[in-house]
Amino acid sequence: MSTIQLVTEANLPTEFGLFRIVGFEFPDTKKEHIALVMGDVAQSEEPILARIHSECLTGDALHSLKCDCGFQLAAALKQISEVGKGVLIYHREEGRGIGIINKIRAYSLQDQGMDTIEANLALGFAADERNFNVCADIFNLLGVKKVRLLTNNPQKIETMKQAGINVVERIPLNVGENRYNTEYLDTKAKKMGHFIIHNGHKHLMDCPYCQEEVPKK
Ligand SMILES: Nc1nc2c(ncn2[C@@H]2O[C@H](COP(=O)(O)OP(=O)(O)OP(=O)(O)O)[C@@H](O)[C@H]2O)c(=O)[nH]1
């Protein structure tokens, strides 16, 4: 398999500030990934604030409350803009790598009582089908060698370290808990070893989106 290449970039003004959007592609499979970059991050002596964010169409764009993804995306971009420098890799691995249609199938099984892991397994997938190695290649293409990684997922840190990216710090990203995703976050903490501060049904104070009561089902 070929290695991913940086193919194009442009300015991207966002509600969080002005980013560069950088496009990456595998020459053979045409599989695409994106990074949002703020400031001069290449060959920096200082560690770069960074987030690897796997695609979640429902959370990132459709305002779903079933997960914490959209809240994490917004919080990460906000933190990068506050520092004025950083990288968000938008890792195009929808549904932990099973794709949007299979994620809907998994949601349907979750409607019937399965948790997020059981649903993946029932569909014949691993609990997590993602490969984070491509994110290390993207950091390398951007000249980023040392990061402060915004994540609760130990696997992302492990893969970066093994691929030679120096993760000098993990910055927790506990935002967006609500009554619809409490069980999902609980399952990730218990079954996938994620570092999640489990707050029961209490909304986290640092989440600008969770101050208001979510309507009952
Ligand atoms: N299969 C499946 N995927 C889900 C479900 N809910 C969310 N996802 C996907 O889970 C992934 C979450 O991505 P991230 O937020 O980057 O990763 P994470 O493993 O939670 O790690 P951190 O957020 O960094 O702590 C995305 O690809 C979502 O589309 C679900 O119930 N089933």
Image: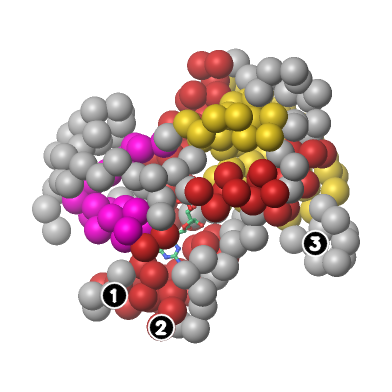
Quadrant position of the N terminus in the picture: bottom right
Mark whose residue sits in front, 1 or 3? 1
What x and y, as percent, mark residue 50?
Answer: 60, 32
Query: Which label number is shown at residue 190?
Result: none
2 or 3: tag closer to the N-terminus: 3
Determine the CA span between mark 1 and mark 3. Answer: 34 Å
Mark whose residue sits in front, 2 or 3? 2
Q: Is residue 197 left or right of residue 38?
A: left
Label 3: element kind: loop
Residue density around tag 1, few if under 14, some if 14–19, many if 20 or more, within 10 Å: some
Q: Is residue 205 above or below residue 63?
A: above
Q: At 36% from the left edge and 63% from the top edge, which residue is drawn?
A: 191
Q: At 49% from the left edge and 83% from the top edge, which residue is drawn?
A: 124
Tell me if residue 185 is in the magenta stretch.
yes
Q: Which residue is mark 1?
A: 114
Amino acid at pointer 3: Lys
Label 2: element kind: helix
2 or 1: tag closer to the N-terminus: 1
What x and y, as percent, mark residue 151?
Answer: 49, 40
Q: Which residue is mark 3?
A: 30
Observer able to see residue 70: no
Q: Which residue is mark 2?
A: 122
- Give the magenta range: 173-190
Amino acid at pointer 1: Met
- Residue in front for this viewpoint, 212 or 176: 176
Q: At 69% from the left edge and 18% from the top edge, which residue is drawn?
A: 46
Label 1: element kind: loop
